[in-house]
Image: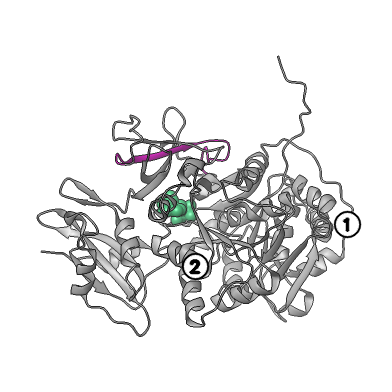
């Protein structure tokens, strides 16, 4: 027997419709890449998204067509999220920090028909245009006064001109909720980029899921600033969750440096933010240098790579800002787990609470998970046994766009994350490592994440990475690579001594190397594949 409830399909446009109707005067504030601050309301954002929808239809964009973006977090990018998806096309957010050859690969692989770009990327797109033949039209996300006098880009026009030619008042169409709405390629940290094609259904469910208090937690009383870029897994869903909850949205544009972020947080009253650890490590240093304090920021979500406990401690104790540690992947929309204390953990000591919160957290409803051994059998949730982390749920990838990868799912339908993890008896998952980064020493596994987290707790260390290097006796041993804080010194001996007594003897790094900077991926993670190349041939006694 079927239920008798309305079969209203879940659609992305229903989110902006809702915000325009019920939070019509709530603001979206963004820093324009071409200069200045732009400020308008959800009602106006809906109107302009409808103008965009009409413009796309006039250009012949059809259901399923890919529309690319090379853009920062701005109101125009926000309009693209809704205008493109709203007509049944696919908003393909491209990470401009990828290598040019990866960008060309991605644009050609997805066959984007239009490409919208911020003025910052003008020199880049001039180089891309001749080698991306599927793109019929390039659109500069600015007014016509910013268009270059001459250009090789086919059909180049300005976004503001495109919109000005269209009336609003468009009725968002209804269609099957499994229709694709956005596309994001993995950043290729360990492989070629692969496309993850989200649906309206998965996106709306994910936006609801991340809004829960134990997940990212969003409310109409929040002022949300996603520092995580809108090209990095849809800014973790916040451009959907903010309007869904009626929260004010603050978009930092190209100003991703600490001073610009801090200024915007203060002037706009940001209460809640989100981003990768590198951003917060830099911001902490900036806050310390100027003995600054946040007047409204209360909470931030940190994920994308492991959040060092020392960073969490400094944020709470020095800046009165709580960090929610979260785990996810492009393939999981991205939220999988978040670390929030349960009622029966409130009475723990401060240190015990910190140890729980440092884990990647509990499964959010919508993502089921398990850890399995080499034989595929589930491992116990004892906080000790570690194995491959598998997930499944309505916002987890089933296959990659145009790159069928059958091996990624188990026979019984679980997605292999490529991460190795433990789960404790209270359900908190902790990532030990990516399976490709774990260091295999003798018969033991050493977690590079544990060692990196410890290293950055040393006052002279700005950033640290641990990789396995060949050892004749143990097969692999940990090498610690460090970037020192400006003006601070620490010797290799002192650094090695810092680990003594803090980790098991066999886990202590064998050697330390100092570098000026570490290689990073396009999403701000340490690029270990490059680091392993840099230290190829290095071996320890
Ligand atoms: P890419 O795989 O290209 O780096 P993703 O952003 O999808 O792009 O990366 C997902 C991976 O990032 C996860 O599989 C995991 O290894 C790592 N990761 C994400 N969040 C965390 C976290 N909180 N702690 C440790 N690792 C994390």
x, y percentage for residue 509? 21, 62
Q: Quick check: 500 left or right of 256?
A: left
- Secondary structure under tag 1 reads loop
Name which quarter of the figure residue 34 lies in.
bottom right
Q: Quick check: 365 left or right of 20?
A: left
Query: Vertical placement of 368 versus 75: above or below?
Result: above
Q: Circle 2 is placed at which residue position?
A: 280
395 inside magenta stretch: yes
Extreme residue in the bottom direction: 487
x, y percentage for residue 335? 54, 47
Q: Say the numbered circle drawn on residue 168.
A: 1
Q: Quadrant of the N terminus?
A: top right
Q: Is mark 1 within 8 Å of ligand 1?
A: no
* Residue drawn at 84 percent across, 56 percent down: 24
Is residue 421 visible in the rendered structure shown here?
yes
Front in this rendered view, residue 431 or 176:
431
x, y percentage for residue 504? 20, 54
Query: Vertical placement of 246 versus 498: above or below?
Result: above
Extreme residue in the top direction: 1
- Structural distance between the alpha carbons of marks 1 and 2: 40 Å
**What segment carries the magenta color?**
384-400
Name which quarter of the figure residue 493 lies in.
bottom left
């Amino acid at each position: 027997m079927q239920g008798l409830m309305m079969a209203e399909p879940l659609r992305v446009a229903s989110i902006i419709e809702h915000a325009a109707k019920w939070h019509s005067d709530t603001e979206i504030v963004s820093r324009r890449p071409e200069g200045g601050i732009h400020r308008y309301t959800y009602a106006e954002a809906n109107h302009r998204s409808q103008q965009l929808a009409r413009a796309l239809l006039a250009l012949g964009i059809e259901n399923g067509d890919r529309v690319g973006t090379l853009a920062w977090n701005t109101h125009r990018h926000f309009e693209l999220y809704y205008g493109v998806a709203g007509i049944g096309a696919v908003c393909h957010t491209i990470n401009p920090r990828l290598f040019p050859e990866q960008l060309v690969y991605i644009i050609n692989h997805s066959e984007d028909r239009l490409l919208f770009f911020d003025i910052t990327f003008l020199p880049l797109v001039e180089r891309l245009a001749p080698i991306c033949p599927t793109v019929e039209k390039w659109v500069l996300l600015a007014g016509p006064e910013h268009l270059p006098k001459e250009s090789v880009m086919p059909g180049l026009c300005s976004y503001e001109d495109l919109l000005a030619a269209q009336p609003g008042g468009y009725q968002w169409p209804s269609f099957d909720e499994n229709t694709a709405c956005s596309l994001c390629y993995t950043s290729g940290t360990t492989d070629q980029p692969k496309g993850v094609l989200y649906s309206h259904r998965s996106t709306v469910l994910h936006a609801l899921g991340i809004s829960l208090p134990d997940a990212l937690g969003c409310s109409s009383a929040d002022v949300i600033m996603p520092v995580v870029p809108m090209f990095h897994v849809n800014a973790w869903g916040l451009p959907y969750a903010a309007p869904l909850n009626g929260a004010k949205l603050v978009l930092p544009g190209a100003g991703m440096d600490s001073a610009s972020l801090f200024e915007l947080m203060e002037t706009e009253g940001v209460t809640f933010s989100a981003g990768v650890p590198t951003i917060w490590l830099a911001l902490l240093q900036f806050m310390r240098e100027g003995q600054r304090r946040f007047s409204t920021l209360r909470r931030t979500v940190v994920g994308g790579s492991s959040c060092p406990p020392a960073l969490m401690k400094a944020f709470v104790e020095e800046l009165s800002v709580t960090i929610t540690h979260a785990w996810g992947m492009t393939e999981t929309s991205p939220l999988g787990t978040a670390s929030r204390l349960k009622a029966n953990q409130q009475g723990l000591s401060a240190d015990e609470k910190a140890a729980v919160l440092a884990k990647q957290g509990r499964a959010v409803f919508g993502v089921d998970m398990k850890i399995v051994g080499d034989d595929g059998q589930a491992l116990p949730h004892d906080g000790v046994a570690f194995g491959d982390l598998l997930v499944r749920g309505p916002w987890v990838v089933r296959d990659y766009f145009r790159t069928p990868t059958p091996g990624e799912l188990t026979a019984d339908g679980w997605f292999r994350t490529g991460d190795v993890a433990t789960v404790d008896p209270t359900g908190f998952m902790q990532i030990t490592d990516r399976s490709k980064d774990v260091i295999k020493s003798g018969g033991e596994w050493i977690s590079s994440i544990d060692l990196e987290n410890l290293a950055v707790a040393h006052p002279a260390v700005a950033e640290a990475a641990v990789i396995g290097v060949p050892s004749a006796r143990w097969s692999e041993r940990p090498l610690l690579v460090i970037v020192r804080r400006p003006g601070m010194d620490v010797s290799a001996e002192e650094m090695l001594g810092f680990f003594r007594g803090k980790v098991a003897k066999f886990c202590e790094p064998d050697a330390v190397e100092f570098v000026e900077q570490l290689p990073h991926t396009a999403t701000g993670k340490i690029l270990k594949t490059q680091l392993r190349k840099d230290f190829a041939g290095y071996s320890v006694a």
